[in-house]
Image (tube, helix red, strand yellow):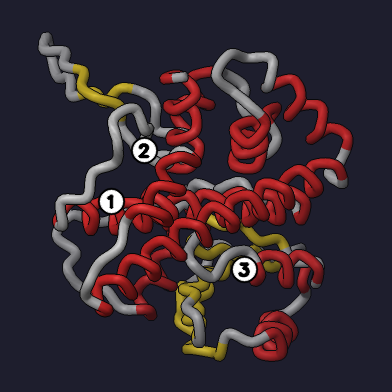
C-alpha cells in the first residue's frame, strides 16, 4: 500500500525550505537545502520511492526549473498560486520553515490551486514577447526624457511636425543644438537612447516572426485565427497565445476573463449587491494587450 508524502517547498534563489505531510500522519520540517540540482536529487532519493511523492511550491521569480527537474525524475509536482494559499486570520509570524509547513499541510488537504505550467515552446515565446514589452517601456521612458529635456529649454518642433515621426527626429538632429557642451552631450545621449530603443524593438519583432515560423502547428493556427479579430495584429496575437497557453484548458468564457483579471469585482451581502471595477488580479500582460486591442 502506498503511503503518499506531500512535500511543501518554500523556494528561494539559493535555498529551499522543506516540510513533509504524510498521508494520515504527522507534518514535520526537514530543514533547508541549497537550490541546486544535486541537492534536489539527493532529497528525492532520501524521501523514498518517487511514485509516492507529491511536491508543491509557490510560483515566483525562480520560474519552473524546479518543476521540470522533479517531473523528469518521475515525481509529481504542482506549482501553486501564492495569492490563493489560505492564510489564518491573525497569523503575523512568517518564516521559511512555517511557509513550507503551511504548503505541505494545505497540499495534503487539497486546498491549493495549481497554476498552468507552460511547455518549452510557450515558455520560449513568452520570454520573447515579454522582452519586447520591456523594450517598449524602455523606449517610452527614453522618449519622455528627450521630450521633457527639449521642453525645459523651449525647443519646440515646427507646426505640423508630429511627435516621434521621421520629420521630428530629423528636426532634432539638424536644428536642435546648444552652446553649452554639457547640454549638447545630454541631447546626443537622449537621442541615442531613443534610436537604440527603436532598433531594439525592431530586432525583437523580427525575432518574434521567426519564432512563430518554428512554433508547433497548433500554436501557429491559433495565432493566425486570432488575427481575424479587429484590433489584434501579429504581435498581439502572439502575446495572447504565449500568455494563455492552451485555450482548451478554459471551459467557459468567464474562466478566461478571470485569468486576465477582466471580471468585475463584487461586494454583496444580504439584500445589498455592489459591483465595482475589474479585479486586475490575473495575468497583467494578457490584460494589457487585450485592453489595447479593444481600444484599437
- Whether residue 18 is visible, yes or no, is yes
Question: Residue 236: where, in percent of width, then height?
Answer: 59, 33
Q: How crowded is mark 2: few (under 14 residues within 10 Å), some or many (20 or more)?
A: few
Q: Most extreme residue toward the top, as rendered?
A: 271
Q: Residue 163 carries which label?
A: 2
Q: Do the residues labelled 1 and 2 touch (CB within 8 Å)?
A: yes
Circle 2: element type: loop
Circle 3: element type: strand
Vertical comparison of 74 with 19: above or below: above
Q: How crowded is mark 3: few (under 14 residues within 10 Å), some or many (20 or more)?
A: many
In the picture, measured across the screen, residue 182 lies left or right of residue 16, that is: left
Circle 1: element type: helix
Q: Residue 5 carries which label?
A: 3
Q: Nearer the viewer, residue 20 or 180?
A: 180
Q: Which residue is rendered at x = 41% and y = 54% of the image?
A: 174
Q: Which mark is residue 186?
A: none
Q: Mark 1 points at which residue?
A: 147
- Whether residue 51 is visible, yes or no, is no
Amino acid at each position: 500500500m502506498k503511503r503518499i508524502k506531500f512535500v511543501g517547498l518554500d523556494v528561494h534563489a539559493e535555498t529551499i525550505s522543506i516540510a513533509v505531510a504524510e498521508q494520515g500522519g504527522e507534518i514535520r520540517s526537514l530543514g533547508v537545502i541549497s537550490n541546486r540540482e544535486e541537492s534536489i536529487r539527493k532529497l528525492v532519493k532520501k524521501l523514498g520511492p518517487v511514485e509516492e511523492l507529491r511536491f508543491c511550491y509557490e510560483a515566483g521569480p525562480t520560474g519552473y526549473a524546479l518543476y521540470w527537474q522533479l517531473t523528469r525524475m518521475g515525481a509529481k509536482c504542482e506549482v501553486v498560486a501564492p495569492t490563493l494559499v489560505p492564510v489564518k486570520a491573525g497569523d503575523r509570524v512568517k518564516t521559511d520553515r512555517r511557509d513550507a509547513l503551511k504548503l505541505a499541510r494545505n497540499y495534503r488537504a487539497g486546498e491549493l490551486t495549481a497554476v498552468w505550467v507552460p511547455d518549452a515552446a510557450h515558455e520560449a515565446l513568452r520570454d520573447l514577447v515579454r522582452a519586447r514589452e520591456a523594450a517598449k517601456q524602455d523606449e517610452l521612458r527614453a522618449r519622455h526624457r528627450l521630450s521633457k529635456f527639449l521642453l525645459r529649454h523651449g525647443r519646440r518642433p515646427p507646426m505640423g511636425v508630429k511627435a516621434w515621426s521621421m520629420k521630428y527626429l530629423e528636426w532634432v538632429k539638424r536644428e536642435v543644438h546648444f552652446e553649452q557642451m554639457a547640454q549638447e552631450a545630454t541631447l546626443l545621449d537622449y537621442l541615442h537612447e531613443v534610436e537604440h530603443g527603436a532598433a531594439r524593438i525592431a530586432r525583437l519583432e523580427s525575432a518574434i516572426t521567426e519564432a512563430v515560423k518554428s512554433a508547433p502547428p497548433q500554436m501557429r493556427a491559433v495565432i493566425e485565427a486570432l488575427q481575424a479579430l479587429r484590433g489584434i495584429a501579429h504581435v498581439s496575437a502572439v502575446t495572447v497565445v504565449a500568455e494563455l497557453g492552451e485555450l482548451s484548458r478554459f471551459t467557459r468564457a468567464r474562466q478566461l476573463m478571470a485569468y486576465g483579471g477582466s471580471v468585475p469585482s463584487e461586494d454583496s451581502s444580504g439584500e445589498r449587491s455592489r459591483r465595482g471595477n475589474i479585479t486586475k488580479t490575473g495575468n497583467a500582460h494578457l490584460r494589457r494587450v487585450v485592453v489595447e486591442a479593444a481600444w484599437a
